[in-house]
Image (cartoon, rainbow, N blue to C red):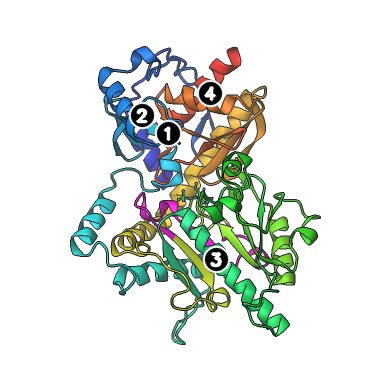
């Protein structure tokens, strides 16, 4: 029995709690994933089961919300629910209401909530050695770095084609890792390292010293609708006026291009460019994929001017597409010099990492960059445990199967609701999006789904994003899709 079918069986027998307005699923047809597909949208979940109106907020919840209002900086617009615990792909609020979590802490909880292996690894690592700082070596950081690099070499990425391996008997594996604590900090590190590479390349070309005031190879190129983080450096390459404007001036020398626009590359990326940063699949910006041909052109242009190409795979990497990296299957001439990662690496414990080829790493020496917490024994022990499980062949096969099934179910929605939805499902694997014709709909769909017990996310100005745990079952996909179908049915009737 294929993994997904086993999962489907397990989760389909789970009793579905909300049967309000129940209507049996219409007759089934076979899909290419081997699972049956409905022939009509479900209306089983048209009624609200998890109300959020003022009168439904209990005194207990209101007291928690009031305390939050009194003490927490109000930078997040949050619904009036307070989550308390989770297990697998489900979370429960303080009132015991159950939610199916298709947001996974924004593409973080790859192994779901309260995973036993993660808990045990955390317990062991924390009771041995929680933190040391980078003044000393710890055994877990180098083990995780080795796993990241050897998996990348074997499965493809960072310039290696699948099946590559490199012995480190000569003292180097061919690539290096810098550990940080978040995605933002990984990108911040990558940009700093690329700046240093730019100066070194300029010095080599001109024969002058890298710190000469005339060195102008420090510009950075990013793209519209990108999201790379909120620190001053990462924010400077996050080209969203809503995030940037209140904090101007940002770092100078940033140029913004358009994803997949090839003609502009020649002027966009020039001799002053030290780095280009791009998400192979934009997450926050709307699940927009970069075309492989465009990435080839971008790689070529970076080589022509000696710029470092950085792929931000913080949201789309680490098996979310069914491959270690979204770029693993790209040809050799669409490969980056550096990759940044974070979110799922320790399944919710903060960690970030920058992977880079030796050709980039060689400019970094002791004291040129650092962090107190990055690469801690606890974070790296968790990272090693999580990555070992994510890279398991059966696990990856399940991600591909379930991703294919979810994509098929979303494809049906685009046929059933052409007035509401774009005709194409965005993304790959388990980073998928539905594009909406009316920009007010994504927010409403997320809210309406939550009021029916399913947690989704918006993305960009016009999309709903689906980034569930990577071990989600087909039955859970079916449940979430029935809720989304019911919500779209309600919207359609308005
Ligand atoms: C592609 C991408 N880069 C960077 C970040 C920032 O990561 P963090 O929030 O961990 O700092 C995010 C967060 O959503 C992201 O999706």
Gap in Å between the C-alphas at discs 3 and 2?
37 Å
Bounds of the magenta span?
A: 327-352
Upstream in sequence: badge 4 or badge 1: 1
Residue 171 against residue 483 in the figure, above or below: below
Q: Residue at x 53, y 79 (%)?
A: 362
| Image coordinates for residue 198, horizontal then vertical, percent | 64, 72
Q: Does the image show residue 33?
A: no
- Say whether marks 2 and 1 touch (CB < 8 Å): yes
Q: Is residue 334 magenta?
A: yes
Give the labeled residue for mark 3.
192
Is disc 4 surrounded by few (<14), some (14 to 19) or many (20+) residues within 10 Å?
some
Is disc 1 surrounded by few (<14), some (14 to 19) or many (20+) residues within 10 Å?
few
Upstream in sequence: badge 1 or badge 3: 1
Q: Is residue 281 magenta?
A: no
State the quadrant of the C terminus. top right
- Say whether marks 1 and 3 touch (CB < 8 Å): no
Query: In front here: 268 or 249?
Result: 249
Q: At numbered mark 4, what does the secondary structure look like: helix, strand or loop?
A: helix
Give the labeled residue for mark 2.
69
Give the labeled residue for mark 1.
74
Gap in Å between the C-alphas at discs 4 and 1?
21 Å
Give the labeled residue for mark 4.
444
Residue 430 against residue 318 in the figure, above or below: above
Q: Please name which of the two marks, 4 or 3, marks the residue nearer to the observer.
A: 3
């Amino acid at each position: 029995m294929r993994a997904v079918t086993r999962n489907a069986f397990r989760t389909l027998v789970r009793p579905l709690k909300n049967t309000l307005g129940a209507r049996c699923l219409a007759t089934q047809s076979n899909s290419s994933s081997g699972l049956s597909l409905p022939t009509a949208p479900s209306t089983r979940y048209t009624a609200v089961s998890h109300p959020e109106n003022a009168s439904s907020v209990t005194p207990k919840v209101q007291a928690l919300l009031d305390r939050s209002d009194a003490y927490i900086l109000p930078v997040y617009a949050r619904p009036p629910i307070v989550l308390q615990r989770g297990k697998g792909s489900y979370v429960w609020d303080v009132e015991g209401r159950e939610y199916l979590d298709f947001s996974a802490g924004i593409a973080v909880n790859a192994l779901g909530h309260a995973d036993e292996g993660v808990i045990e690894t955390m317990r062991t690592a924390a009771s041995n050695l929680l933190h040391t700082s980078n003044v000393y070596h710890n055994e877990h950081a180098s083990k995780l770095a080795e796993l990241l690099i050897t998996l990348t070499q074997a499965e493809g990425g960072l310039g290696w084609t699948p099946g590559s391996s490199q012995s480190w008997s000569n003292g180097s594996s061919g690539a290096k890792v810098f550990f940080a604590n978040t995605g933002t900090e990984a990108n911040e590190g990558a940009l700093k390292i690329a700046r240093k590479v730019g100066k070194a390349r300029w010095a080599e070309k001109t024969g002058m010293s890298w710190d000469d005031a005339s060195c102008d190879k420090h510009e950075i190129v990013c793209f519209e609708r990108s999201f790379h983080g909120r620190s001053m450096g990462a924010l400077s390459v996050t080209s969203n006026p809503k995030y940037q404007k209140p904090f101007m001036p940002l770092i100078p020398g940033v140029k913004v291009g358009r994803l997949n626009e090839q003609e502009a590359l020649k002027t966009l990326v020039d001799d002053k460019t030290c780095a280009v940063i791009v998400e192979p699949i934009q997450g926050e910006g709307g699940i927009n994929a970069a075309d492989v041909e465009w990435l080839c052109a971008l790689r070529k242009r970076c080589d022509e001017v000696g710029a470092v190409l950085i792929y931000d795979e913080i949201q789309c990497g680490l098996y979310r597409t069914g491959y270690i990296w979204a770029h693993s299957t790209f040809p050799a001439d669409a490969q980056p010099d550096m990759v940044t990662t974070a979110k799922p690496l320790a399944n919710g414990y903060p960690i970030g990492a920058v992977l880079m080829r030796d050709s980039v790493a060689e400019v970094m020496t002791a004291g040129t960059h650092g962090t107190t917490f990055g690469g801690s024994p606890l974070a790296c022990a968790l990272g090693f445990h999580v990555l070992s499980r994510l890279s398991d062949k059966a696990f990856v096969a399940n991600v591909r199967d379930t991703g294919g099934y979810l994509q098929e179910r979303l494809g049906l929605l685009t046929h059933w609701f052409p007035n509401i939805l774009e005709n194409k499902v965005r993304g790959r694997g388990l980073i998928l999006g539905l594009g909406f014709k009316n920009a007010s709909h994504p927010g409403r769909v997320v809210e309406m789904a939550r009021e029916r017990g399913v947690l989704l996310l918006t993305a960009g100005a016009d999309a709903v994003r689906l980034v569930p745990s990577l071990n989600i079952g087909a039955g859970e996909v079916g449940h979430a899709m029935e809720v989304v179908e019911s919500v779209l049915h309600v919207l359609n009737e308005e």
